[in-house]
Each structure stands twice: as C-alpha cells, then as structure tokens.
Image: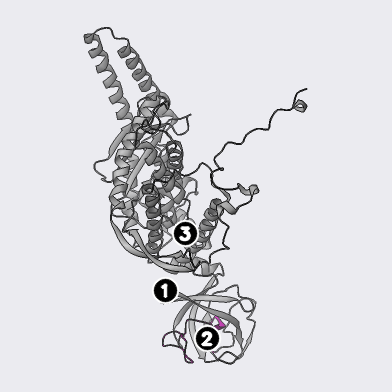
C-alpha cells in the first residue's frame, strides 16, 4: 500500500466518503459485458444453486437448481448456462481483423512477421466478487472433462453436448483472470477498490454492497453508516436486506427459507413418483410446480439485489475516462481469446489437469512480467498513481534548468547531452543508475550523473532540499545524461532532448518489460520435470508389492 493510498483511506474515514485513487479507469469495459451472479449451495463445493446471467440489465435470465444434490438437475442448469454463454462468445469469434504477429520460421529459425486473424473484440465476463472468479474456475475444471453420449455411449451420467465446451471456455477465462491487468473475466469488487479508497479494510471491500455504500452513499448518510447498514440490516423475516454478492449464501437464508423449500420440493417429487392414477398425478404435479416456483422466487430474491449492484458499479466505473494504455492490455486479451478460439476450432483436447513444467514456468513468467508492466503503465497513464511512485522514491518530476550538449568518446561520436532537472522529490538515485521518461509513447533512457552543488556534480544535502547551489528556487538539481531516442545523426532530432523550462518526469522503473530466458520444448524436459507431454495426466502407479513389504 502506497502512501497515497494510506492518505486516501484516512481522508475517506474523515469525510465519510470513498476517495479516488486514480484519475482514469485502468480496466477496459466493453459496451455489452455478460454479467454473471452465481449462487452455490453451502457445504458442497461447486454445487450451483442458481444464477442471474445476461447482458441486459433490465432482463436477466434466472437459472435455478431446485435440488442441488441431483446430478441431472445440475447438468440441466449447466446446459442452460451454456445455451446463454456460448452464443455470446460465438458472436465475437467470427468478427476478425488482419493483424501481424512474430513467429519463428521453421526453416531458418528466424523471427518473421506473418499476417494472421485477430478477433476485433472479445467477450467480457463480469462477476460480483473474487469468489465468483474462483467458482468460474471450479466449474470449468468440473465440466471440461465430462463425457457426452456421443463421445462415449456407455459413460455413466453423460453430460449435455455443450457442457464440456463451456467448461473449456470457463477454464480459459479463469486462467486469464490470474494475469494482472487482464479484463476478460473481472471481479467488480477488485476493480472498484482499485479506483476508490474506502474507510474500511480490504477484506470488507469484498462485500459489494458495503463497497458501493462508501463510493456512492445515500443522501445525508456517511459511507460508514451506509456500509454498516448494507452488511447487517435484516428484514422482518431475519433476512439480509443486502445479501452477500455470492456465491455463498447467508446461513439464516439457508436454515429458515431454503432448506424448508427444498424439503418441500423433495416431498412433492416423491409423491409424484408414487402417484397411482392420472388425477392424483396432476395434483402432485401442481404441488411440485408450486414448490419449484417457490425456490425460484427465493433464489431471485438473493441474486437480484446483487445484479442491480453490479450494474450500478459499472455505471460508476464508466464515469472515469479509460486510460490510454488500457487498450493495449485489452489487445493482449483479444489475442488470448483468439488463440483459444483457434485451439477449439482445431479440435485440440481440453486443458490438462496439471500443467507440465514448461507451461507452468511460462505462465509464472507471464504473470510476473504483466504485473510489472501493469504497474508501470498505470503510473504513466495516471498522475495520481505516479504521485505514489514519486513519494516512494521510484520517480521524480521537475523542470529543466539547463541543457549542455556533450558527445560520447570513440570513433563515431554520438550525442549525449547533459540535462539538469530541478525537483522537489527525493528519488533513490545511485551512481550510473538509469532513469526513463516517456517520449512519444516510447521509453527514453538517461543515466544519472550526479547532483549539482555549487556548479559541480556532488551529493545533495541530507534533507534533499535547499536550492542545491543552482540559484533561486528550492529543490535539488539532478544532472542526467540522455542515452538514446535521439536519431542516428550527430545532432539530436528536434524534440528528442528536453529544453530549458520544459516539465519532465523520469522514473527509476522500466516502462517496457524484457522477456526472460527461452525455455526448452516440453519434449526436451528431463524426467525430473515431467518428461515428454502426454504423460503429465497419467496417474502415478504404485510400486509392485514385494516380500519385504509384508511382515
């Protein structure tokens, strides 16, 4: 947590209202995201109870499992979910545009540019909170290996045809959600808490109702009062007025309302199965329909408040302009979506239960690289985020006070101008440390030469203040040597070197992340790291029983 975030939280406590942490929106939002508000059964992991899903805030689709322990009803729920989600995904799969991508030429081994298809946009899935993302991953893992009757006629409990395909897509979205900066699968509480600081803890921010109460409290009420009411207020039946944002349910709801309703449904099903004639069957069918309708009403009462809260949160996010580099991260999401679409169309098998060593290392390296890139891009897009990096000594801003042209030594002298910057910040600069500034969207690097004191490079005062011997005005004089992005000529190109009086901002962190060392192909990994592909999913076989194993 940066000092800016700490100060914002303190101010939120003082004012009773959440304080902005950013000036722009650092996550991409599509025009028509698919919102999913899931609900699960307590005590059984991954057993769905119901969901509200759709792209129209005024017309959501309600899906309910009247008896979550019934495997057939759960498959029917997943099939209905697939009938909603898969057409939404397919609508984006056919709209493509031409794009260039670097690939390795199999004959020469060199990197060449090839023209490929890239989906013009990608489907975006929004869930209320972080637990919703974990449920999406769990559902994907439980669905993608299901066998259908067409694949295996003898399989017990065959799944509907589209369920395994939905499992593959949910698995991909769940894995992509682990990449920092990705927006394919987004938890609304995480995005809101990234852009606003509340006066409560980060754990309390996972309650969507309480978080929205801080950001947009009712008229005449503070955020703390509204958040407390959202968390604790109950109606005459003892039920929460603002239910949890799923997928978990409130124990009072489970014990007082849901359990009796499911028990009534079970009795009606048993009675219908035992009916002896048509008249009795019609009566029992009416009882079963009424019991099922009652469960639908209960699930709707728990999911509809969260559904409305999700759309309210999206409205709040859309009031912020999108950051310039958010589109670049969304392009990488589009590449990810296009790649998985191509794998599905090519008939490749579903994702393995466990990644091989090379795939796991690549995923870890990607997440580390994207985390560093996200932090750098957010600071470059947002002066408020950059202020936090400046307070932490990772960047400094100031005004150019002098520019002296200098050249490198050697046969071909290249321009290496010395730029003096007056700054009030206290960057953590050391000898020959490299710093970077954004020049036309590209990073220009410079080298720290020293501090200017009494006309010579030296060390500033211990407090980092004073005029640094540079004349009138406070601050420290920092001398930098520009290293690149000045053209190939002997004289720098116009605009490539800051001029006297220009405001500048340099960072100690790199703007672009470098790729790591190339990993071997999966078939070249040693047996200690899983061996060749195809054996990673095989169950380990126990050693044969010998005489020494028997007493």
Marks 3 and 2, the one that precedes in the sequence: 3
Tags 1 and 2 touching, CB below 8 Å: no
- The image quadrant that residue 26 belongs to is bottom left
The one of 551 and 474 positioned closer to us in this rendering: 551
Q: The residue tagged with tag 2: helix, strand or loop?
A: strand
Q: Residue at x 37, y 26 (%)?
A: 72
Q: The residue tagged with tag 1: helix, strand or loop?
A: loop
In the rendered structure, which segment of residues is drawn in magenta? 471-496
- Of the residues tagged 1 and 2, which is closer to the observer? 1
**Residue highlighted by disc 1:** 441
Percent from the top left, x then y, of residue 306? 35, 41
Asked if the stretch drawn in magenta spans residue 451, the answer is no
Disc number for residue 8: 3
What's the distance in space between the residues labelled 3 and 2, CA to CA? 35 Å
Q: Residue at x 31, y 50 (%)?
A: 33
Disc number for residue 51: none
**Residue highlighted by disc 2:** 419
């Amino acid at each position: 947590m940066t000092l800016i975030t700490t100060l914002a939280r303190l101010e939120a406590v003082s004012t009773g209202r959440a304080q902005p942490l950013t000036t722009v929106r650092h996550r991409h939002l599509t025009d028509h995201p698919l919102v999913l508000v899931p609900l699960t059964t307590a005590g059984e992991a991954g057993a769905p109870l119901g969901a509200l899903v759709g792209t129209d805030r005024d017309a959501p689709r309600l899906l309910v499992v009247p008896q979550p322990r019934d495997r057939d009803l759960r498959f029917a729920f997943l099939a209905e979910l697939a009938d909603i989600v898969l057409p939404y995904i397919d609508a984006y799969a056919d709209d493509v545009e031409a794009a260039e991508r670097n690939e390795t030429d199999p004959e020469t081994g060199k990197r060449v540019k090839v023209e490929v298809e890239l989906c013009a946009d990608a489907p975006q899935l929004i869930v209320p909170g972080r637990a919703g993302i974990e449920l999406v991953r769990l559902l994907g893992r439980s669905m993608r290996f299901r066998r259908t009757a067409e694949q295996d006629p003898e399989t017990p409990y065959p799944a509907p045809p589209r369920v395994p395909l939905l499992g593959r897509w949910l698995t991909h979205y769940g894995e992509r959600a682990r990449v920092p900066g990705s927006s394919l699968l987004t938890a609304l509480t995480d995005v809101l808490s990234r852009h606003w600081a509340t006066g409560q803890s980060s754990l309390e921010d996972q309650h969507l109702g309480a978080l929205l109460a801080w950001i947009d409290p009712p008229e005449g009420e503070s955020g703390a009062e509204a958040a407390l009411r959202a968390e604790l207020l109950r109606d005459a039946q003892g039920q929460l007025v603002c239910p949890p944002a799923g997928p978990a349910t409130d124990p009072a709801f489970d014990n007082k309302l849901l359990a009796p309703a499911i028990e009534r449904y079970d009795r009606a099903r048993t009675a219908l199965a035992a009916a002896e004639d048509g008249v009795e069957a019609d009566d029992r069918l009416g009882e079963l329909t009424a019991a099922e309708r009652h469960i639908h009403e209960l699930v709707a009462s728990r999911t509809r408040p969260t559904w409305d809260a999700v759309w309210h949160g999206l409205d709040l996010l859309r009031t912020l302009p999108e950051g310039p580099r958010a589109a670049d991260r969304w392009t990488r999401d589009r590449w990810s979506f296009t790649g998985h679409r191509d794998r599905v169309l090519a008939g490749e098998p579903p994702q393995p239960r466990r990644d091989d060593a090379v795939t796991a290392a690549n995923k870890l390296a990607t997440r580390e690289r994207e985390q560093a890139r996200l932090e750098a891009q957010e600071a470059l897009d947002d002066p408020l985020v950059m202020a936090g990096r400046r307070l932490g000594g990772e960047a400094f801003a100031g005004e150019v006070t002098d520019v002296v042209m200098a050249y490198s030594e050697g046969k071909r002298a290249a321009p290496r101008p010395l730029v003096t910057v007056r700054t009030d910040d206290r960057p953590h600069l050391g000898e020959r440390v490299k710093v970077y500034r954004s020049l036309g969207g590209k990073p220009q690097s410079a080298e720290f030469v020293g501090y200017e004191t009494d006309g010579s490079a030296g060390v500033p005062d211990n407090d980092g203040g004073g005029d640094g011997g540079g004349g009138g005005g406070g601050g420290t004089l920092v001398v930098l040597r520009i290293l690149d992005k000045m053209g190939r000529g002997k004289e720098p190109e116009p605009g490539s070197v800051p001029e006297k009086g220009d405001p500048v901002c340099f960072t100690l962190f790199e703007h672009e992340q470098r790729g790591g060392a190339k990993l071997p192909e999966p078939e070249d990994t040693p047996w200690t790291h899983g061996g060749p592909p195809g054996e990673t999913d095989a169950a380990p076989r126990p050693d044969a029983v010998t005489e020494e194993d028997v007493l």
